[in-house]
Structure formats: structure tokens, C-alpha cells
């Protein structure tokens, strides 16, 4: 039993000892029944918020108006929520009010049947008012009650349906699916931050290509990522892309990624070619489709997309750089040693290599550039790609040069010679700098 579960059982036990119902609720019940060890535990109870606060010395009233109290137990915390029924949802996210009620009515307000079950840690029994166990066994994701009503209450639930169907590999129940398709445009009313978080949870799944398919077929992709939806029907030169249009290519790349990759990798895969529709041309004389500058255009668009979805500046810069550089890999065999070393020494080069690998495998299949870079990495392994500089700006000042724009030009010239093993001592570097100044 995990420390988190022991803590949750302790909290539920104290509520039970005080004469209250105290059941595990939601995802932890679903995961337990699936044979997956839960790490987050929520407790549902008939105790009122003020009663919960009196029973435990350390609490935080994160949503007392909705009956939610966080109980602290050593290093662990657990949400304790009073059984409730929600009044009308006005903002598409929060109920205008709640009334405390029975477990049955509490289950009826929840999103999906597999998330609306309870588990009594005292009797070790599952309490299921919505046939969630049957849906779990059949691997069906079904909204509780009227799907359209559930999605009207909180429109993010449509994206949550896609996420659960992706991560759990469940089919979406027919009426639930139809309600998503009918109401997909309403997702624009949800905050960018909440949309971003659900997208990340979806694409972190090894089944991320199916997640893209579900987003697309449901109608949610176009209002969230119109730049991705625009990839449909964007034809590519068959000699380099026999797989089909840009959307098909991107989907194949997602499917070729390892099960677990950093967020910036699948984000760069999703966005690396979004500049292609805007740069599509076909030269009649050559009968050849081209996308001149799509990497630069795509980098600008990627920044706009990620800013719109409120990503951090750090993550934005990481993905934008990958998109901007993804076509550079085709030229690595022609690079001078210094340029190649600088290219390979960038902080997230390993992630960009993964982008290039699946880019090739999802199109022409030629991994020659990868083999070349692996060979060069072995050759360069005996010393840092970018060694400590032989001279600095102080040395240039010692030569009588005043600080200014030429400093970087001279130091770059010297570093290039160092990277190409043409110089190896400070004396040789100073001599090269002096020669550069006289020419």
C-alpha cells in the first residue's frame, strides 16, 4: 500500500469514527479497479465542510463554497469533498451554487461513469450508482446522464473525454461522442490554460496518434489548433513524402515516437510543418511541390500557437528552436567542423535529433544524416564539443582593441579555428587575432 493511500485511509477512518460516510471517489477508484496503483486520493463524505475542518488540525479551504476542503496529513494532502448536487452552470465551468445531498446525487453530477464510483475503505466495497464498473469492463467511456448537459456544465469535459479515451484506450459511447461533435465549437469558451493542460495529458500518452485522430474527428481540433487542421489536404512531393499529405505525415511521426518523450518533442512534431500550407507552391516547369521557408514561417506560427495556449517562455523557445532548425539536419554532412560542433552542442540537440529521426521515418525513410551525426559524436567524444576559449575579451583589450561589435567577430573567428583544431594554445589564438585585425 502506497504512503498516499495510507494517508487517505487514515483521513477516511477519522471521518468514519466521527459517524460520517467517508469513501474514496473518482480516479483513484477507477485506477484501483483497473489494477493500477493510484497516487492521488480524493475522499467524498456526508460531513459538512465546517465539520471536516473541526476534525482535522491542518486544513485548507480551497473550495469551501463547493464543499471542498484539503486535509493535510504530514507530507501528504487529500481533498475531502462533501456529497453535493450542483445548481446551474453559468460560466461553463463552475456551478452558480451547490446543495449538500446524498451520494447518489453526488455521483449523478460527475463527468463520466468510470469516474463516478466510490470505494468504502472500511468495508472494502465498491459503491456504484451509475454502472461504472460495467463500462470499465467493456472499456467504454460514457457520460453520466445526459452527455449534452454534462458538457454544457463544463465544456472542458469534451477534451477530458478525448484524453481518457486516448490514455485508457477506451471507446467513446455513441451518444457521448455525438454530444462532443455537436458542441465542439464551445471549447473556445474554456481558458487557454485548461485546454493546454488537457492537450499535454493527451499527447503524453503512448497512444498520442489516436489522440490526434479523436481530436480531429470530434471537431475539437479545428477550434483549438486551426493550424493543425489546415494540414489536411496539403499535398507534398511524392518523391520525398510517399505517405501523403502533411496531416498524415505528422500523424505518422507521432506514432513513431517512443512511448515516453519530453513535452517539447511531441510539441515540435505536432508543429514542425504548420508553415507548409502558407508556403505551398508548385512549379509547373519542374512539376515539383515546394515549401520554401516553411521552417522559418512555422517557427513564427509555433510561437503564436504556444503563446495563445499560455506555455512558459522556456518551453516556447525550446519548441520554436526545434521547428526553426528541423530542415538544417539535411545539410549536416556539408557543414564545416566548427559549424557542425556548434550545431551539435546546443542544449536540446538530442530532442531535435528525435524530431529528425521520426521526420525521416514518417516520409522517405533515409536515416543517413542520423548515422553521420552518430559517427561524428563518436569522433568528438574525447573532448567537449565547445572547449573553454583560448582567449577572451580581456586579451583583445590587451592588444589595444576597444570593446565593441568587432569583439564577437574576432572571438568567433578564433573559436572556429580552435574547433577545427587549427590552433590549440592561447599564444596561437592571440597571433590569429592579430592577423585578423591587420586584414
Image (cartoon, helix red, strand yellow):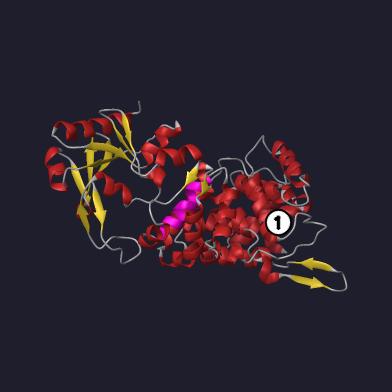
Name above or below for residue 83 compared with residue 225.
above
Residue placed at 42% from the left, 36% from the top?
Answer: 31
Work out whether residue 228 or residue 116 is closer to the camera in this orientation and state it: 116
Name the foreground residue: 434 vs 408.
408
Look at 38% across and 51% down and name the residue there. Answer: 144
Callout 1: few (<14), some (14-19), or many (20+) C-alpha neighbours within 10 Å?
few
Q: Residue furthest right?
A: 285
Res 231 seen here: yes
| 182 left or right, relative to 100 | right
Give the quadrant of residue 413.
bottom right
Answer with the quarter of the image where residue 98 lies: bottom left
- Position of 360 relative to 8 (above/below): below
Q: Secondary structure at mark 1?
A: helix
From where the camera sits, is residue 347 visible? Answer: no
Q: Could you say where residue 370 lies in the image, as x and y percent from the top left?
A: 73, 44
Residue 424 x, y percent position in the rendering: 68, 43
Query: To which residue does mark 1 refer?
Result: 328
Farthest bottom residue in view = 284
Q: Quadrant of the N terminus?
A: top left
* Frontmost residue, 200 versus 373: 200
Quadrant containing the C terminus in the rendered view? bottom right
Q: In the image, is 291 to the left or to the right of 135?
A: right
Q: Main secondary structure of the magenta part?
A: helix
> Compared to 134, does 107 lie above or below?
below
Q: Is 156 colored magenta in this rendering?
A: yes
Q: Residue at x 82, y 72 (%)?
A: 283
**Residue 244 placement (x, y as % from top left):** 74, 58
Q: Is residue 326 magenta?
A: no
Rendered location of residue 362, percent (x, y): 71, 50
Frontmost residue, 267 versus 194: 194
Give the residues in magenta: 155-166
Amino acid at each position: 500500500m502506497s504512503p498516499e493511500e495510507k494517508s487517505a485511509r487514515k483521513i477516511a477512518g477519522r471521518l468514519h469514527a466521527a459517524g460520517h460516510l467517508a469513501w474514496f471517489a473518482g480516479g483513484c477508484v477507477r485506477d484501483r479497479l483497473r489494477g493500477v496503483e493510484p497516487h492521488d486520493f480524493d475522499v467524498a463524505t456526508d460531513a459538512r465542510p465546517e465539520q471536516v475542518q473541526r476534525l482535522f488540525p491542518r486544513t485548507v479551504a480551497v473550495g469551501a463554497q463547493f464543499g471542498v476542503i484539503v486535509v493535510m496529513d504530514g507530507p501528504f494532502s487529500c481533498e475531502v469533498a462533501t456529497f453535493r448536487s450542483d445548481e446551474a452552470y453559468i460560466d461553463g465551468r463552475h456551478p452558480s451554487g451547490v446543495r449538500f445531498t446524498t451520494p447518489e446525487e453526488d455521483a449523478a453530477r460527475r463527468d463520466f461513469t468510470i469516474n463516478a464510483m466510490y470505494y468504502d475503505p472500511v468495508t472494502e466495497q465498491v459503491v456504484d450508482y451509475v454502472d461504472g464498473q460495467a463500462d470499465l469492463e467493456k472499456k467504454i467511456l460514457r457520460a453520466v446522464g445526459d452527455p449534452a448537459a454534462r458538457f454544457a456544465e463544463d465544456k472542458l469535459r469534451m477534451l477530458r473525454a478525448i484524453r481518457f479515451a486516448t490514455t485508457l484506450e477506451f471507446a467513446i459511447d455513441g451518444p457521448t461522442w455525438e454530444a462532443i461533435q455537436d458542441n465542439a465549437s464551445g471549447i473556445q469558451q474554456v481558458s487557454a490554460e485548461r485546454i493546454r493542460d488537457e492537450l499535454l495529458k493527451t499527447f503524453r500518452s503512448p497512444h498520442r496518434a489516436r489522440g490526434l485522430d479523436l481530436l480531429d474527428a470530434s471537431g475539437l481540433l479545428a477550434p483549438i489548433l486551426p493550424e493543425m487542421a489546415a494540414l489536411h489536404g496539403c499535398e507534398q512531393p511524392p518523391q520525398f513524402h510517399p505517405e501523403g499529405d502533411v496531416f498524415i505525415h505528422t500523424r505518422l511521426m507521432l506514432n513513431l515516437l517512443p512511448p515516453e518523450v519530453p513535452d517539447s518533442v511531441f510539441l515540435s512534431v505536432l508543429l514542425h510543418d504548420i508553415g507548409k500550407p502558407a508556403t505551398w507552391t508548385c512549379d509547373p516547369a519542374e512539376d515539383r511541390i515546394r515549401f520554401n521557408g516553411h521552417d522559418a514561417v512555422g517557427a513564427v506560427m509555433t510561437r503564436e500557437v504556444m503563446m495563445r495556449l499560455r506555455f512558459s517562455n522556456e518551453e516556447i523557445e525550446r519548441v520554436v528552436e526545434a521547428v526553426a532548425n528541423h530542415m538544417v539536419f539535411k545539410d549536416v554532412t556539408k557543414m564545416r567542423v566548427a559549424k557542425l560542433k556548434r550545431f551539435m552542442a546546443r542544449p536540446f540537440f538530442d530532442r531535435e535529433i528525435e524530431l529528425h529521426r521520426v521526420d525521416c521515418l514518417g516520409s522517405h525513410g533515409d536515416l543517413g544524416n542520423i548515422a553521420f551525426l552518430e559517427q561524428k559524436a563518436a569522433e568528438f567524444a574525447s573532448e567537449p564539443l565547445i572547449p573553454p576559449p583560448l582567449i577572451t575579451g580581456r586579451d583583445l583589450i590587451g592588444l589595444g582593441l576597444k570593446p565593441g561589435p568587432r569583439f564577437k567577430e574576432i572571438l568567433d573567428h578564433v573559436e572556429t579555428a580552435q574547433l577545427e583544431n587549427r590552433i590549440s594554445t592561447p599564444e596561437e589564438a592571440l597571433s590569429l587575432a592579430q592577423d585578423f585585425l591587420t586584414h
